[in-house]
Image: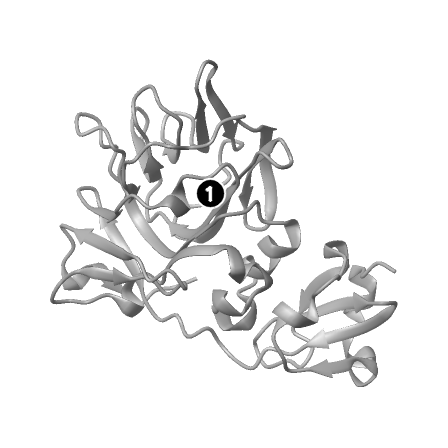
Amino acid sequence: MKLSAFMLSLSSILSPLLADFTGSPVDIFSGVDPKEISVADIDNDGSKDVIFVDNGTIKILYQDGAAANTKSIKFNGNQTIQVNSNDSFNVADFSVSFWVKFEVLPASQTRHTFFSKSATGKEQYKMSYNGTYQRIEFHVYEQGFGWIECKASQGALIAGQWHHIVGIHSVSTAKMSLWIDGTMASSNRASLSYVTNNLSLKIGSAEDVSFPNFLNAQIDEFAFYTTGLSQADISLLFNKIQGGNLNKLPSSSKLALWLTMGDHASDSSYIAQDSSKNGLSAYLINFIDSDYLQDTP
């Protein structure tokens, strides 16, 4: 049974018939076909509720309010968030999810790095915005072959608007993909290699000090997963289900890093708190207090 736009339009009629759940989707969604998950504001409280089909029964998981996330962080063209090398980032299957907002889209002949774990001549990955072609590019380097790329269509991002971005690399499915606002924008074959370089994961700049390609944009809710996220996972992230608490989503067992940015940053030491189970330290380089903005997706 498929959930259709027609069925969602009848939400006021269906609401009394839907089984009401308040537990965690980690348990509720066990065994549920990802294609049967949808979202809509059933109870008209401004939050998006999760609708799904479980053994032929339509069920709903009500969300009870806005996300706790209150701040994002602004990169001004000379800053980096650095997470020191960790085995969680040296994997064959991984996904990176984050929100980004450009006030002005990058100019031609510029490249703005979202994240990078790169080392010359070694397995590596990175994602950036190419100002010349006005598109997002997701790159993975495979030893003995070269770069494998996913490139979004030109003009996919709009200045002054928040966009949700996901990059997925999965050796298990032999596929990598790039997603923008819940929709797949590009796909390619996956690398056959594990990423084994011992360099830090950088957010907002590349590893090469000669060409750091600094970011000039706002970033929020940066998350790294040691798995290839499913379409259903991406939908839950894009719609900020469970109030944006990633530890309450089905994919939480594979959540290796979660930076809520300004919400849990230490002004004194400039260390962004990792809200995943790993509790890693993320070092904010060249940031000041005014870079924490009360402007979120």
Q: Amino acid at mark 1?
A: Leu
- Residue 109, quarter of the rendered image: top left
Q: Nearer the viewer, residue 122 or 175?
A: 122
| Label 1 SS | loop
Q: Is residue 140 visible?
A: yes
Q: Closer to the camera, 287 or 77?
A: 287
Residue beneath disc 1: 157
Question: Could you say which is closer to the camera, residue 68 or residue 282?
Answer: 282
User: Where is residue 257 shown, x and y percent of the image?
Assistant: 39, 55
| Residue 42, picture quadrant | bottom right
Q: In which quadrant of the rendered view does residue 269 lie?
A: bottom left
Q: Is residue 100 left or right of residue 5?
A: left
Expressed as whole percent of the image width and height from the top left, the position of residue 105 reads 35, 40
Residue 95, position in %: x, y?
50, 45
What residue is shown at x 59% (from left), y 77% (from top)?
Answer: 63
Name the residue rendered at 58%, 34% in the picture: 171
